[in-house]
Image: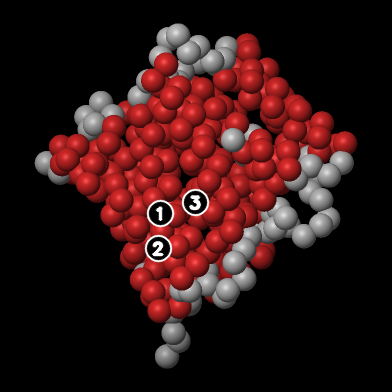
């Protein structure tokens, strides 16, 4: 009798066969496709409720798929602390992200979200070509940001809070992807998502109850969870396992461009000439960036 394939072994083979840039491309698309659908769900469910539906739905998917509680007896105290930290960060990051998206355009939130990762990209620069790539990417983000603090100051407070938390997410997730402990990064991500579900429940469940009487809203929430917190976070893990942290951070500069395109396609938030110029600069920066030959986990 043939035993079912081990999910960890299957994802390991997939990770080794597919270029890491391809995983990142999938993550970039779904990173804002899910939130775009969530913005439409906000019309029926409060911001905190949408955050709960996203995180709890993702936790259910990871629980069924990976059964991350199996890691309990194999985690050292330091690893457990890392997963607890990532879980809390995921809960807080997703919450402030939606609080920002409810007030300012998705493309602006995306541009601000990238700013924190510039620190990681700058630290990892090793040659003139990569420095030029960073300059082009920064110019593109500045063009896309078009910050108007007077219009919606609270929205920008949440957007910059999300920026800081996203930076922490990248650092913690990259560490998990490269622990070298024999534990699957995706399994650890699943455990962190279960922790995030516990963390978001006290303040998010109340708003989410409005969706319990509407199966279509619950289904939409599950779709947001898969598109926002399962597909992009899993492909992030697969890409991070093979890319330097600084390289991954620079590639994140494509996210504001992705947010602009998806904002147009899903939310009818039309880009301006300045937005298009920003997208072109970011694309050029990512295109000329060269992966350093040193150890990827620097």
Residue 272 located left or right of residue 295: left
Q: Name the element at disc 1.
A: helix
Which residue is painted at 46% across and 71% down in the image?
77
Residue 277 located left or right of residue 192: right
Disc with the residue nearer the chain's start (1 vs 3): 1
Does residue 220 show up? no
Image location of residue 209, percent across then percent down: 15, 41
On the image, numbered disc 3 is attached to which residue?
Answer: 233
In the displayed structure, 79 sits above or below 263; it is below
Q: Where is the N terminus found, in terms of image quarters?
A: bottom left
- Distance from disc 2 to disc 1, alpha carbons, whole Å, reads 8 Å
On the image, numbered disc 1 is attached to which residue?
Answer: 87
In the displayed structure, 110 sits above or below 95; it is above
Image location of residue 26, percent across then percent down: 56, 46
Disc with the residue nearer the chain's start (2 vs 1): 1
- Other-residue count near label 3 (Cα within 10 Å), few / some / many at <14 / 14–19 / ≥20: many
- Distance from disc 1 to disc 3, alpha carbons, whole Å, reads 13 Å
Of 198 and 228, which appears nearest the observer? Answer: 198
Examine the image and state in which quarter residue 53 appears. top left
Examine the image and state in which quarter residue 140 appears. top right
Assess whether mark 3 and mark 1 are in contact (beta carbons under 8 angstroms): no
On the image, numbered disc 2 is attached to which residue?
Answer: 191
Assess whether mark 2 and mark 3 are in contact (beta carbons under 8 angstroms): no
Assess whether mark 1 and mark 2 are in contact (beta carbons under 8 angstroms): yes
Which residue is painted at 46% across and 33% down in the image?
161
Which residue is painted at 42% across and 16% down in the image?
153
Of 28 and 209, which appears nearest the observer? Answer: 209
Image location of residue 197, percent across then percent down: 31, 53
Disc with the residue nearer the chain's start (3 vs 2): 2
Does residue 177 show up? yes
- Other-residue count near label 1 (Cα within 10 Å), few / some / many at <14 / 14–19 / ≥20: many
Q: Which mark is residue 267?
A: none
């Amino acid at each position: 009798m043939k035993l079912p394939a081990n999910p960890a072994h299957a994802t390991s083979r997939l990770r080794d066969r597919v270029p890491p840039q391809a995983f990142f491309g999938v993550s970039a698309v779904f990173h804002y496709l899910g939130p775009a659908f969530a913005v439409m769900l906000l019309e029926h469910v409060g911001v905190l409720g949408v955050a709960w539906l996203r995180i709890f739905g993702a936790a259910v998917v990871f629980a069924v798929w990976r059964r991350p509680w199996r890691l309990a007896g194999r985690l050292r105290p330091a690893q457990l602390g890392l997963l607890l930290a990532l879980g809390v960060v995921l809960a807080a990051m997703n919450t402030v992200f939606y609080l920002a998206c409810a007030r300012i355009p998705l493309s602006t939130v995306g541009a601000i979200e990238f700013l924190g990762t510039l620190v990681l990209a700058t630290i990892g620069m090793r040659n003139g070509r990569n420095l030029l790539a960073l300059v082009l990417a920064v110019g593109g983000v500045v063009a896309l940001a078009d910050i108007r603090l007077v219009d919606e100051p609270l929205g920008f407070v949440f957007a910059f809070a999300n920026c800081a938390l996203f930076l922490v997410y990248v650092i913690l997730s990259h560490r998990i992807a490269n622990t070298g402990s024999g534990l699957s990064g995706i399994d650890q991500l699943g455990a962190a998502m279960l922790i995030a579900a516990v963390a978001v429940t006290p303040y998010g469940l109340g708003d989410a109850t409005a969706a319990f009487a509407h199966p279509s809203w619950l289904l939409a929430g599950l779709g947001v969870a898969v598109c926002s917190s399962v597909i992009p976070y899993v492909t992030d893990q697969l890409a991070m396992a093979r890319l330097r942290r600084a390289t991954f951070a620079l590639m994140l500069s494509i996210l504001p461009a992705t947010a602009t395109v998806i904002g147009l396609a899903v939310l009818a938030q039309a880009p301006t000439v300045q937005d298009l110029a920003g997208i072109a600069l970011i694309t050029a920066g990512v295109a000329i960036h060269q992966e350093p030959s040193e150890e990827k986990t620097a």
